[in-house]
Image (cartoon, grey):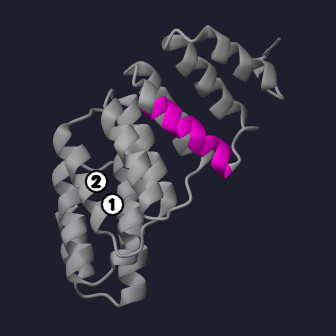
């Protein structure tokens, strides 16, 4: 890995990008990710930062607060924010029990004007459901309506789950009744 980084110094920009992409296809350690990020910044290759974020959050199996902090730092300081990187990070945080962080990142994504995905909303709703964060869940539900994700089965399922965990069975039933597709893992209702 270090040999590959050193050899990148002698290459043209096109070759550097090609080699960095191949490096990013490998499973990275935290220190390797930090080295690659430093290389990206030093060489003005900031447009590759989203690839690094994606590689970290999609390939990291073990959660650490250091990794979460590092990824959020890249997201917050990125010159050209990429919505998919933000959505994958929301998923990463939610899946690793960092529910308030996932919700906070979803809110920040919208503040930056990045169009959220149904993917990001469904994981932010799951985070609110698991942490029993009612106000956050209600806030995201309002955003779901605003952005038109009411018809997305994943978002609707996350809403049913949210309201069920909050003990609001009437609202959970209303969301369920409005679902266009009532099919879960091959079971139709």
The residue tagged 2 is: 72
Indicate whether 178 appears above or below 93.
above
The stretch of residues the image draws in magenta is 136-147
Vertically, is 72 above or below 62?
Answer: below
Q: Position of residue 159 (x, y in %)?
A: 60, 26
- Label 1: how many Cα within 10 Å (few below 14, some 14–19, many 20+): many
Q: Position of residue 11 (x, y in %)?
A: 31, 87
Whether the residues at callouts 1 and 2 have beta carbons within 8 Å, the answer is yes
Please say whether residue 29 is visible from this viewpoint: yes
Please name whichever residue, 123 or 166, is drawn nearer the observer in this view of the structure: 166
Q: Which residue is pictured at 64% across the width and 34% down the height?
A: 155
x%, y% of residue 67?
22, 45
Q: In front here: 11 or 127?
A: 127
The residue located at (39%, 25%) in the rendering is 133
* Horizontal relation, residue 133 to residue 123: left or right: left
Does the magenta segment cover residue 142?
A: yes
Q: Measuring 20% from the left and 36% from the top, which residue is drawn there?
A: 64
Q: Is residue 72 magenta?
A: no
Considering only vertical position in the picture, is 57 above or below 42?
above
> Is 153 left or right of 66, judged from the image as shown?
right
To which quarter of the image does residue 76 belong? bottom left
Q: In which quadrant will I find the N terminus?
A: bottom left
Residue 186 position by quadrant: top right
Q: Secondary structure at mark 2?
A: helix
| Dominant SS type (magenta) | helix
User: Does residue 185 appear anywhere in the picture?
Assistant: no
Residue 35 or residue 93, whichever sits in front: 93
Q: Which residue is mark 1?
A: 75
């Amino acid at each position: 890995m270090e040999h590959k980084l050193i050899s990148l110094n002698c290459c043209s920009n096109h070759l550097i990008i090609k080699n960095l992409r191949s490096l990013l296809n490998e499973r990275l350690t935290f220190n390797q990710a930090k080295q690659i990020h430093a290389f990206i910044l030093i060489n003005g290759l900031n447009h590759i930062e989203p690839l690094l974020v994606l590689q970290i959050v999609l390939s990291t199996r073990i959660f650490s607060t250091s990794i979460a902090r590092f990824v959020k730092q890249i997201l917050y300081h990125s010159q050209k924010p990429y919505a998919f990187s933000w959505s994958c990070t929301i998923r990463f945080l939610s899946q690793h029990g960092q529910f308030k962080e996932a919700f906070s990142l979803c809110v920040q994504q919208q503040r930056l004007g990045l169009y959220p995905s149904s993917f990001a909303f469904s994981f932010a709703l799951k985070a609110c459901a698991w942490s029993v964060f009612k106000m956050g869940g209600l806030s995201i539900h309002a955003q779901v309506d605003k952005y038109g994700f009411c018809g997305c089965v994943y978002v609707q399922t996350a809403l049913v789950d949210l309201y069920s965990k909050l003990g609001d069975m009437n609202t959970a039933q209303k969301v369920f009744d409005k679902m266009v597709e009532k099919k879960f893992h091959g079971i139709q209702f």
